[in-house]
Image (spheres, rainbow, N blue to C red):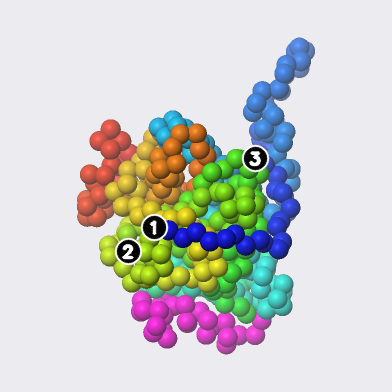
């Protein structure tokens, strides 16, 4: 377990509004000319009236996501278990925040001028977030990814406007690794930047300045614990940093790690073991083989770590769908399992927050396919009474 003093953050963003703007159609309910006695506003009307109004373009719609109370998990644990609905970002994932911040950072540092090019190595949500942000801001986007990725991912990035280079999948220490190729591509162009999501701490800053303050405000400062998994580590590190700072160290923060990632063993061994890569996971976008620059400044603030098996994550994908109506990807489901375990560890009456990173739309052909679940040995993880959701062969 790590426990260290909490360092103060010099700049903290101003408070964010509680609710994201509601759809305009919500205010245009059926029109009647018949006079009616004034009614007290319903809770729903009040919520809509507090909506923030018009936002400026795609980037204005990033963040201020709802904090959803997970009803069944809360009942089961006697805690308030809350999921930050990052799938409600306009590009569909938590990575919209990082995408915006790495681009803004490059602009502010004079590395990116109008008409410039953003280059990144990614096969996942960061590329999608960057594609939207770049289109909205008038930049070209070039993506390098391992050629082991599905055609669907390549097609999606291309249709969003990115130039995509699938390259042979080789280890990070090989100069032909997709990240190094991305860096060299940016170097070879004028007015271009490699946004380097893993080690560019503008990513972590997005969560110090937005995700953390939003969670604090949405819970009125009544939050006892926070947990989530890491890919780059930006979400965990930045949110942990803010919550620890604002609460004087009171909010307990935990890493949630899938099998195959080195971080769980690293944290549980007090920083001694960074080599345990045992196991593998079907989760995408999370799990890490090193301590990134985004995670490094805050890893000592963590109060512990949980290792979550794929069986539990798959079960939670189906439970969240059936019990909460939430169609979540596996990393979000893993986070909910972790939040549940943290709640059980803390005991009744606590508030535990986690991240609902993205929806299941991009993963449906796996998570809801009988053949894929069977191949992965995970078919038995789907609760019997929820098997009717497995509709794909
Ligand atoms: C689906 C999903 N979940 C979680 C994460 C992890 O977020 P972070 O990179 O901030 O650690 C990612 C990152 O790409 C992701 O794509």
Task: Tell which of 43 and 119 is nearer to you.
Answer: 43
Considering only order in the chain, which callout, 3 or 1, is on the residue closer to the N terminus?
A: 3
Categorize mark 2 by other alpha carbons within 10 Å: few (<14), some (14-19), many (20+): some
Q: Are marks 2 and 3 in contact (CB under 8 Å)?
A: no
Name the front one of labels 2 and 3: 3
Image quadrant assignment for residue 60: bottom right
The total of numbered circles placed on residues is 3
Residue 195, percent from left and from top: 57, 73
Considering only order in the chain, which callout, 3 or 2, is on the residue closer to the N terminus?
A: 3
> Could you tell me which residue is drawn at 28 percent across and 42 percent down?
382
> Could you tell me which residue is drawn at 57 percent across and 49 percent down?
250
Q: Is residue 5 left or right of residue 166?
A: right
Please determine whether, in this image, residue 192 is positioned above or below residue 206: below
Residue 181 magenta-highlighted:
yes
Disc 3, SS: loop
Where is mark 1, residue-wise?
257
User: Quick check: can you spot residue 151?
Assistant: no
User: Quick check: can you spot residue 260?
Assistant: yes
Label ID, residue 260: 2
Disc 2, SS: loop
Please determine whether, in this image, residue 57 is positioned above or below residue 296: above
Task: Tell which of 242 and 380 is nearer to you.
Answer: 242
> Could you tell me which residue is drawn at 36 percent across and 79 percent down?
171
Residue 45 magenta-highlighted:
no
Please determine whether, in this image, residue 220 is positioned above or below residue 180: above
Q: Which residues are magenta?
A: 165-191
């Amino acid at each position: 377990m790590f426990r260290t003093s909490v360092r103060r953050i010099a700049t903290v963003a101003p408070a964010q509004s509680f609710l994201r703007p509601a759809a305009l159609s919500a205010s245009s309910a059926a029109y009647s000319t018949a006079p009616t006695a004034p009614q007290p506003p319903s809770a729903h009307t009040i919520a809509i009236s507090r909506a923030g109004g018009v936002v400026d373009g795609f980037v204005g719609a990033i963040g201020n996501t709802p904090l959803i109370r997970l009803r069944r998990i809360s009942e089961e644990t006697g805690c308030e278990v809350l999921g930050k609905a990052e799938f409600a970002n306009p590009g569909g994932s938590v990575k919209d925040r990082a995408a915006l911040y790495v681009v803004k950072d490059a602009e502010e540092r004079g590395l990116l001028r109008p008409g410039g090019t953003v280059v990144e190595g990614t096969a996942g949500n960061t590329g999608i977030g960057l594609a939207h942000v770049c289109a909205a801001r008038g930049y070209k986007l070039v993506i390098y990814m391992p050629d082991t990725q599905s055609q669907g991912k390549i097609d999606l990035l291309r249709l969003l406007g990115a130039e995509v280079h699938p390259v042979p999948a080789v280890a990070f220490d090989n100069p032909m690794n997709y990240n190094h190729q991305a860096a060299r591509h940016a170097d070879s162009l004028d007015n271009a930047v490699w946004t380097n999501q893993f080690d560019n701490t503008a990513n972590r800053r997005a969560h110090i300045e937005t995700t953390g303050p939003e969670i604090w405000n949405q819970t009125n400062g009544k939050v006892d614990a926070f947990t989530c998994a890491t890919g780059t580590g930006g979400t965990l590190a930045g949110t942990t940093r803010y919550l620890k700072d604002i609460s004087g160290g009171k909010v307990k923060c935990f890493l949630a790690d899938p099998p195959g990632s080195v971080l769980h063993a690293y944290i549980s061994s007090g920083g001694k073991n960074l080599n345990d890569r045992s196991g593998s996971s079907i989760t995408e976008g999370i799990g890490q083989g090193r301590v990134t620059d985004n995670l490094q400044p805050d890893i000592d603030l963590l109060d512990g770590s949980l290792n979550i098996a794929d069986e539990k994550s798959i079960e939670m994908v189906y439970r969240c769908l059936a019990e909460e109506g939430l169609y979540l990807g596996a990393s979000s489901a893993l986070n909910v399992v972790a939040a549940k375990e943290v709640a059980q560890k803390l005991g009744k009456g606590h508030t535990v927050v986690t991240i609902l990173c993205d929806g299941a739309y991009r993963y449906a052909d796996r998570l809801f396919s009988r053949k894929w679940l069977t191949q992965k040995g995970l078919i038995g993880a789907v609760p019997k009474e929820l098997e009717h959701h497995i509709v794909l062969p």
